[in-house]
Image: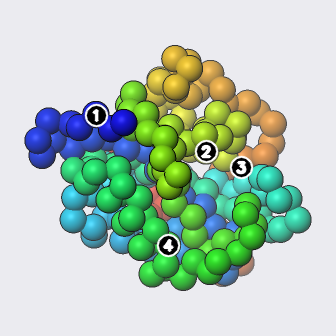
Amino acid sequence: MVEPSPAGAPRTWYLGLGSNVGDRAGLIREAVRRLEGTPGITVQAVSSIYETDPWGDTDQGPFLNLAVRAGCTLEPQQLLAEAKRIEREVGRQPRRRWGPREIDIDLLLSGDLRIETPELTVPHPRLMERQFVLVPLAQLGPDLQLPDGSTVSSHVTNDGSVRLWREQGGEGGNSDADRHVRV
């Protein structure tokens, strides 16, 4: 069940973006630009980009990941539809579960909102298992409360699987979307 925010009031959402195919940084930057250009979505902050080991299906290249905090007046299902539209427009191709992807946009968390439908589960069901999500989230809000009542920063480990990314050898370039948190 979705508890609506007051009429027209934006709800704060945290999104996770990742890519491990092609120009990873360029694809993530383009997805952030498209989120910013979507009516009903206001990007409030973007974490740094992190390079991360693959999760689940580990026989693939490393990912670049970041987190976004956004104010959103869209209903959750509309936000999901916009995220899927952006994935398609940026070039995501159908592949195996947890396999390589040009872009992935996950709806992670929105306050104490709980949704369980066949299409959407909020909070994201594997949020607390994934350092590649927790580390960028901790940059945006170290005291952000998770579903179990703990804070994001209390779950961040130093296991080496998530590294601050720096441009290397022609993949993308430093741009406004590489910025650290902006408010």
Q: Residue at x 66, y 26 (%)?
A: 155
Instruction: Say which label, 2 or 1, has the lower sequence index.
Output: 1
Amino acid type, label 1:
Glu
Mark-to-mark CA distance, 4 and 3: 24 Å
Residue 141, picture quadrant? top left
* Residue pointed to by mark 3: 163
In the image, residue 14 lies at what x, y percent?
43, 44
Amino acid type, label 4:
Glu
Amino acid type, label 2:
Val
Give neighbour class at mark 3: few <14, some 14-19, many 20+ (Cα, 10 Å).
Answer: some
Instruction: Say which label, 4 or 3, has the lower sequence index.
Output: 4
Q: Are marks 4 and 3 in contact (CB under 8 Å)?
A: no
Give neighbour class at mark 1: few <14, some 14-19, many 20+ (Cα, 10 Å).
Answer: few
Q: Residue at x 57, y 70 (%)?
A: 103
In what quadrant of the picture does the N terminus appear?
A: top left
Instruction: Say which label, 3 or 2, has the lower sequence index.
Output: 2
Q: Are marks 4 and 1 in contact (CB under 8 Å)?
A: no
> In the displayed structure, does residue 97 sit left or right of residue 27?
right
Of badges 4 and 2, the one in the foreground is 4
Q: Is residue 47 visible?
A: no
* Residue pointed to by mark 4: 87
